[in-house]
Image: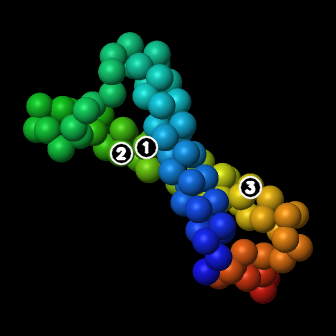
Amino acid sequence: MSKTWSVMEKGSGIGAAIVARKALTTGWSKAARRKPPENPADPDVALVEAMAWAVATGALIAVARTLAMRGAARYYVKSTGHLPPGLEKDGQ
């Protein structure tokens, strides 16, 4: 695997996850008028709140990482003229 692509892939994914988490924390705080649960496994956190936080966090971070990595792949293709190592065209 290309070291350049490896850095691009990991960097874009991590960056997107950090930004998504910050946006979700801010949005949750404004919508719920309280901070999100720091530890959803804590028995003192309501189960509904813990599950809502887990679902929202997982979904938003997955979407953000996918979009960031697709953008990185497009940039890689534009720069090199071919797909990054390990990525192949979807046969659909």
Between label 3 and label 2, give the one nearer the viewer: 3
Identify the residue shown where x is 66% and y is 52%.
68
Drawn side of residue 77 relative to residue 44, left or right: right
On the image, numbered disc 1 is attached to which residue?
57
Foreground of the two, 35 or 77: 77
Identify the residue shown where x is 18% and y is 44%.
41
On the image, numbered disc 3 is attached to which residue?
71
Give amino acid for label 2. Answer: Ala
- Which quarter shows the N terminus? bottom right
Evaluate whether residue 26 shows in this view. yes
Residue 72: quadrant of the picture: bottom right
Label 2–label 1 contact, CB within 8 A? yes
**Pointer 1 local density, CA inside 10 Å: few below 14, some 14–19, many at least 20:** some
Residue 90: quadrant of the picture: bottom right
Between label 1 and label 3, give the one nearer the viewer: 3
Residue 74 x/y as whole percent: 80, 62
Dot 2: element: helix
Of pointers 3 and 2, the one earlier in the residue sequence: 2
Residues under labels 1 and 3: Cα distance? 21 Å
Residue 34 x/y as whole percent: 33, 16
